[in-house]
Amino acid sequence: MQRPLNRALAGAAALAVALALASTAEAQVGLTSNTATVTLNATKLSTLTVAPSTGTASIASITDNSAANVFSAVSIQTDWNLTAGTSVRLIGWFATPASALANGAAVIPSANVEGGINGGGWTPFTGAAVGGVGVAGGSLQLFSQAVAAATYLGTRTDNLNLRLNLAGFPATTAGLYTGTLNVQAVVQ
C-alpha cells in the first residue's frame, strides 16, 4: 500500500510544481526591462576641391613684344561642402615668381603671365598670398565666391584665360618654355 500512496504523493508534488511554474510563467508575461540608449554620431568632413579640365595649356608660337600670346583654354571646376566660412576663393600662383616659365637660363617672370576668369580682363600674377595660399609677388586671386549656411554646399565652373604679355619684354630665346601654375582654393 505504500506504493500507491507514494505514487499519489509524487503525482501531487509534480502537480504542485507544475502549477507553481505555470503561475510564475504567467506572472512574467508582459515584464519589460529597463530602456538602454545608444547615442549615434556621424561626421561628414568638409571638402574643397579644384579640378582643371586639362593639365597642360600651350601656346603654339610665342610672339615677342606682344600681348597676343594666349594659351589654350582651361576650364576649372571648384566644389565645396563646408560647415563655416564667408567665402571660397580661387588663387593661381607660381612658386618662383622670378621664373614662372623657363627655357634653360632664359626665364619669363610671373609679372608677364596674366590671367582672367570667364572673359574678364587680364591681370598679372604679381599679388600676395591669400589666406595662406600662394606666394608674395606671384599670386592672383581668380575669384571670390560668397558663401553662407544656405550655400555651404556648392560648385562652380570657370574658364581660366591665360596669356604671356611680352610687350616691352626683351626678345625670348628660341625653345620650349615650361612652368607650373598652381591653382588652389581657400575658405575664409
Image: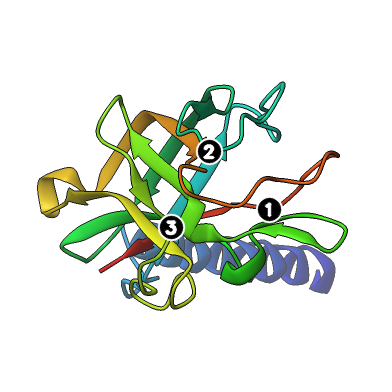
| Place of residue 51 in the rendered image (x, y in percent of width and height, measured from the top left) | 55, 38
| Place of residue 102 in the rendered image (x, y in percent of width and height, measured from the top left) | 76, 55
| Place of residue 83 in the rendered image (x, y in percent of width and height, measured from the top left) | 26, 62
Identify the residue under disc 2: 65
Going by the numbered disc 3, the residue's amino acid type is Phe
- Residue drawn at x 34%, y 75% is 131
In the figure, residue 33 lies in which quadrant? bottom left
Going by the numbered disc 2, the residue's amino acid type is Asn
Going by the image, does 160 lie left or right of 35?
right
Where residue 125 is drawn, which disc sits there?
Answer: 3
Kindly report the distance in space between the C-alpha atoms of the residues bearing marks 2 and 1: 23 Å
- Residue drawn at x 48%, y 26% is 68
Q: Nearer the viewer, residue 66 or 143?
A: 66
Identify the residue under disc 1: 180
Where residue 127 is drawn, which disc sits there?
Answer: none
Which of the two labelled residues, at mark 1 and mark 3, occupies the earlier sequence position? 3
- Residue drawn at x 79%, y 46% is 173
Q: Nearer the viewer, mark 1 or mark 3?
A: 3
In the figure, residue 58 lies in which quadrant? top right
Q: Is residue 175 above or below residue 24?
A: above
**Circle 1 sits in a helix, a strand or a loop, which is it?**
loop
Q: Nearer the viewer, mark 3 or mark 2?
A: 2
Q: Quadrant of the C terminus?
A: bottom left
**Circle 3 sits in a helix, a strand or a loop, which is it?**
loop
Kindly report the distance in space between the C-alpha atoms of the residues bearing marks 1 and 3: 12 Å
Can residue 94 be seen here?
A: yes
Going by the image, does 43 lie left or right of 110?
left
The crowding category of the residue bearing disc 3, from other C-alpha atoms within 10 Å (few below 14, some 14 to 19, many at least 20), is many
